[in-house]
Image: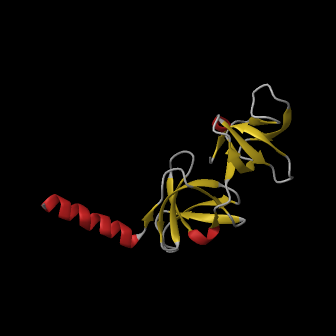
Amino acid sequence: MRLSAVSSCLLLLLLSVGSVVSAADFVSVRDSSAILYDAPSIEAKKLYVVNRYMPFEQVVTLNSWVKVRDRSGGLYWIEKRALSNNRQVFALLPLVSVREKPEAGSKQVFQIRQQVALQMIESTGTGWIQVQHQDGNKGYVRSTEVWGD
């Protein structure tokens, strides 16, 4: 009985303070740049400045702040207003081929360099993601070659 009361209190506390986001919810930086902090306050220590389109996994939302995880697993706080639900992916390899179809032997449409952002259109569910470059070109990349999906 005592254990369930403690569990209930903890659950209520979590729900009242903020919301836990489901796994694999990704966001990207909307502004031209944004600051990553070590705590949810502009008075907290500023850790990094990141550029537009940088994808992050959303971990926790707390009022006007979001705790995010980068591709290396680092956790940071960022102001919610600096983020967009527009899905972006970043190339992980020095050079990533974007293909016409979601197949390894398909014609290469274009290539991107490491950390270039592409808008994610959809996942095929077969290990490939349909993407669009800022110039409008579309194609498919392997999900293992990008981060943010």
Q: Residue, x 31% and y 69% (percent of image)?
A: 12
- Seen in the image, is 25 located left or right of residue 115? left
Q: How many marks?
A: 0
User: Which residue is the extreme one toward the top?
Assistant: 105
**Residue 94: quarter of image:** top right
Give the image quarter of residue 147.
top right
**Residue drawn at (48%, 59%), measured in percent from left and top?**
21
145, above or below 48, in the image? above
Residue furthest out toward the left: 1
Foreground pick, 144 / 42: 144
Instruction: Name the residue: 39% across, 71% down.
Output: 17
From the viewer's perspective, is 40 left or right of 26? left
Q: Quadrant of residue 129?
A: top right
Q: Of 27 and 126, which appears nearest the observer?
A: 126
Q: Position of residue 77 (x, y in %)?
A: 51, 63
Q: Residue at x 53, y 50 (%)?
A: 24
Left or right of 51? Residue 77 is left
Q: Position of residue 128 (x, y in %)?
A: 69, 37
Q: From what the image shows, is residue 108 above or below residue 41?
A: above
Residue 119 pos. (x, y %):
73, 52
Classify the position of the N terminus by image quarter.
bottom left
x, y percentage for residue 109?
A: 86, 37
